[in-house]
């Protein structure tokens, strides 16, 4: 162009080109004009720079993002540009790369965009990439060495879209129950303990806010924790009462003198005594406990008509095995046990017969 101005500032004023201290004018705005000379004006652009995990704003006069990052990395090391976000729009005040294609990395997957000179929002739209307020977007410069660095077909810039998702998850934790033992002073100590209250496992539900970046979990923040079921302690009862000492055996009565003319009554009296002894409720109890068989020995530690344990049989004055005694002796000692401790010594059958 032709001008009658002698300096660059006058030329810019004549052409209506307003510049500020943020812009770059080459040669300087206070320089003189020369025939055939070229004046280059580069406008300043404010960009957001990310470095070392922190963000700050700065001004650049680069023609594209690739040039801006090349310049900024010389001063600040590993840097990236952070686009502005407004009304759902993502934008940079610069084109991406006017000379090369660029890489587009979305959710960890990379694709090549041939038109690197496009604006950032156009690149995202043309490749059907939508972002929300939680997603992270940066423009980064790649490290390319050797022959590939000089090839115009090798991308040196990447647009990185990290997809950030937050979901709610619940975890269930089992709460173990405690085991308690309680003494019963009214229960004989030789009786087996029993479970009075069965233990119940509790349950606690914890709610978490889980954040993932490109599908990988990066944060787990506890939102709440609630015990939905409290554990119930298991209570086992054992006896502490000592068995009373057995009563002494009664003195045997003298045998009657047998009459010569009469047969001895012993053989006829024995079966009758057994029948009488096991009649009525005791016959029903014996039938329930052992099927009515006085010689029952199942090998589980219980014997005879009324399923005596050996310690209980001995405590009632018995000797040997209960299953070796006569039915009448077994019934006599069972009646003695019932008088001392009640029908609870045969809980199952006594309940079945309505005795409890």
Image (cartoon, helix red, strand yellow):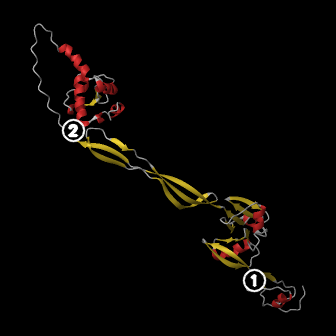
Does residue 125 appear left or right of residue 245 in this picture? Answer: right
Residue density around tag 1, few if under 14, some if 14–19, many if 20 or more, within 10 Å: some
Q: In this orientation, which residue lies closer to the viewer: 154 or 233?
A: 233
Q: Residue at x 32, y 28 (%)?
A: 289
Indicate the quadrant containing the N terminus: top left, top right, bottom left or bottom right.
Answer: bottom right
Q: Which mark is residue 243?
A: 2
The answer to which of marks 2 and 1 sits earlier in the sequence is 1
**Residue 70: percent from left, percent from top:** 70, 73
Does residue 130 appear left or right of residue 166 in this picture? Answer: right
Q: Is residue 102 visible?
A: yes
Does residue 38 appear left or right of residue 191 in this picture? Answer: right
In the figure, residue 187 lies in which quadrant?
top left
Does residue 57 appear left or right of residue 181 in this picture? Answer: right
Cα separation, mark 2 vs mark 1, equals 107 Å
Q: Residue at x 24, y 23 (%)?
A: 277
Q: Residue at x 24, y 26 (%)?
A: 331
Label 1 element class: loop
In the figure, residue 353 lies in which quadrant?
top left
**Residue 158: percent from left, percent from top:** 71, 65
- Total residue callouts: 2
Indicate the quadrant containing the C terminus: top left, top right, bottom left or bottom right.
Answer: top left
Q: In this orientation, which residue lies closer to the viewer: 139 or 131?
A: 131
Q: Report if the CB atoms under discs 2 and 1 are less than 8 Å apart.
A: no
Foreground tag (2 vs 1) = 2
**Residue 339: percent from left, percent from top:** 23, 34
Q: Which mark is residue 51?
A: none
Q: Circle 1 sits on which residue?
A: 23
Say above or below: 3 vs 144: below
């Amino acid at each position: 162009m032709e001008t009658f101005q002698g300096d660059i500032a006058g030329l810019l004023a004549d052409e209506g080109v307003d510049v500020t201290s943020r812009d770059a004018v080459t040669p300087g705005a206070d320089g003189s004009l020369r025939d055939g000379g070229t004046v280059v004006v580069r406008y300043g652009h404010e960009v957001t720079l990310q470095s070392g995990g922190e963000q700050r704003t700065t001004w650049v006069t680069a023609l594209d993002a690739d040039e801006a990052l090349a310049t900024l990395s010389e001063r600040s090391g590993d840097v990236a540009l952070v686009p502005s976000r407004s009304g759902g729009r993502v934008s940079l005040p610069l084109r991406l790369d006017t000379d090369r294609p660029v890489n587009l990395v979305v959710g960890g997957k990379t694709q090549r965009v041939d038109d690197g000179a496009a604006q950032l929002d156009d690149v995202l739209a043309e490749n059907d990439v939508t972002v929300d307020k939680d997603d992270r977007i940066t423009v980064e410069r790649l490290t390319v060495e050797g022959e590939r660095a000089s090839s115009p077909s090798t991308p040196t810039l990447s647009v990185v879209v990290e997809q950030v998702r937050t979901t709610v998850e619940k975890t269930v934790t089992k709460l173990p129950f405690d085991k308690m033992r309680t003494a019963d002073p009214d229960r004989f100590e030789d009786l087996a303990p029993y479970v009075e209250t069965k233990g119940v496992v509790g349950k606690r539900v914890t709610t978490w806010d889980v954040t993932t970046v490109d599908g990988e979990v990066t944060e787990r923040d506890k939102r709440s924790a609630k015990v939905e079921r409290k554990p119930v302690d298991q209570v086992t009862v054992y006896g502490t009462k000592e068995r009373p000492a057995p009563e002494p055996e009664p003195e045997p009565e003298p045998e009657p003198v047998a009459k010569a003319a009469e047969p001895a009554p012993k053989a006829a009296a024995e079966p009758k005594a057994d029948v009488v002894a096991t009649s009525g409720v005791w016959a029903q109890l014996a039938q329930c406990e052992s099927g009515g068989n006085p010689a029952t020995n199942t090998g589980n530690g219980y014997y005879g008509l009324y399923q005596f344990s050996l310690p209980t049989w001995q405590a009632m004055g018995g000797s040997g095995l209960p299953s070796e005694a006569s039915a009448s002796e077994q019934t006599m000692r069972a009646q003695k046990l019932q008088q001392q401790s009640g029908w609870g010594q045969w809980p199952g059958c006594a309940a079945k017969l309505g005795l409890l």
